[in-house]
Image (cartoon, rainbow, N blue to C red):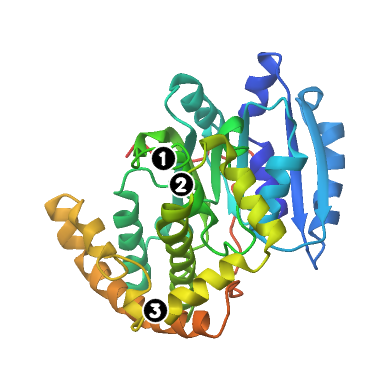
Amino acid sequence: MEPTLRSLFDQSLFADLHRRGMSCEVICVANGCTDRTPEVAAQLFQELAAQHPHRASLELRVANIVERGKVNAWNQYVHQLSARSASVLFMMDADIIIHCRETLANMLATLEADPEAAVAVDLPRKNIAQKKRKSLAERLSLAASRMTLAAEGQLCGQLYSIRANMARSIYLPKDLAACEDGLIKILVCTDLLAHPSWPKRIRVAPEAEHTFEAYTTPRAVLKNQKRQIMGQTILHVLVDQYLGSHWRGDRPNLAAFLKAKDDDDPPWLKRLVREHLQNTRWSWQLYPGLVRNRFQRLGRLKPLRRLACLPAAVAGCCATLTASVLAYRALKSGCIDYWPKAQRSGLETTEPTAEPRCLNHA
């Protein structure tokens, strides 16, 4: 947590806002934490309030909410905690490092320069990318990332900025576990289901990136795949099956519609997933494209890179098939909120005097 926050407050964005006479509020949303995250954040905020060079333009606070879950934290932040005067909201996970000092400033500039963009993202970089000697598993992991990044309109929930009016038009159902970023992407790119997907609503900012710790062990990769498949299944049930046939209202009312469903009938989404599982015979039928997605991404690459990434696509397909069986069994048992605990060693942050290296332009 502390390295993440220190990398955040080293961003040039704060100097830019101060120079423009603008202010920024930073809220650490601690949702059901059982560790010392709220205390660590509060202590660091107190230090920064006294020492940060642009503290006059900063408002810092910790919001400690009881209910756990990223979905709940997102809804609380967007609809309750964030300042109503804010025009842009930044979302950031607590286990990443922003090495490029211009990342947030460039993300904001991307939204300001492009009125068609509703979300600005950076490039997520796995921590293993800078290793000189990589294992086979690490090489396959990096190749899988290259295939994912080849697609347009990718939204990585670890770090992104979104126009506040768009964010406040979205409500995430409480049982939307492990796929909240997918729903946000769909609603942003379709202008709240008004038309087919338009990936240009999500723009990649230049010279902007963050680092996260990659899953590399077979066990960790399989658990992560299982979580993603469960999330994509829930998303398919919600958007393609339910909203596709039940939602006919005005766009601004979609958030209120979904919130009312949660308030009036809390298990509604779980029930829809259960009904979907009753009509799904095989694990690879959980949602369309479960098996072929990796090869579709592979097809977007240039020929030489496609050849280099082929082993990763084949290995990923095998992992997906295995994970789909695990996901199918978990969903059949009624499990929705699956968040495996990852065994991680932690990310290293750059020294304050070091010049951060940004590979985004390469």
N-terminal-most mark, 2 or 3: 2
Q: Which mark is residue 335?
A: none
Q: Quadrant of the N terminus?
A: bottom right
Disc 1 versus disc 3: nearer the observer: 3
- Residue 205 vs 133, above or below: the answer is above
The residue singled out by tag 2 in the image is 185
Q: Residue 348 vs residue 122: left or right? A: right
The residue singled out by tag 3 in the image is 279
Label 2 with label 1: CB-CB less than 8 Å? yes
Q: Quadrant of residue 336?
A: bottom right
Q: Residues within 10 Å of mark 2 (few under 14, many from 20)?
A: many
Residue at image point 59% right, 56% down:
348
Q: Quadrant of the C terminus?
A: top left
Q: Secondary structure at mark 1?
A: helix
Residue at image point 57% right, 81% down:
334
Closest to the observer, 344 or 70 = 70
Q: Quadrant of residue 113?
A: top left
The residue singled out by tag 1 in the image is 189
Question: Which three-letter amino acid code belongs to the residue tagged 1?
Answer: Cys
Closest to the observer, 292 or 135 = 292
- The CA distance from mark 1 to mark 3 is 29 Å
Q: Secondary structure at mark 2?
A: helix
Residue at image point 61% right, 32% down:
164
Tell me residue 33's x, y (percent): 78, 63
Tell me residue 196's x, y (percent): 33, 41
Q: Residue 18 vs residue 284: left or right? A: right
Q: Residues within 10 Å of mark 3 (few under 14, many from 20)?
A: few
Question: Which three-letter amino acid code belongs to the residue tagged 3?
Answer: Asn
Question: Which three-letter amino acid code belongs to the residue tagged 2?
Answer: Lys
N-terminal-most mark, 1 or 3: 1
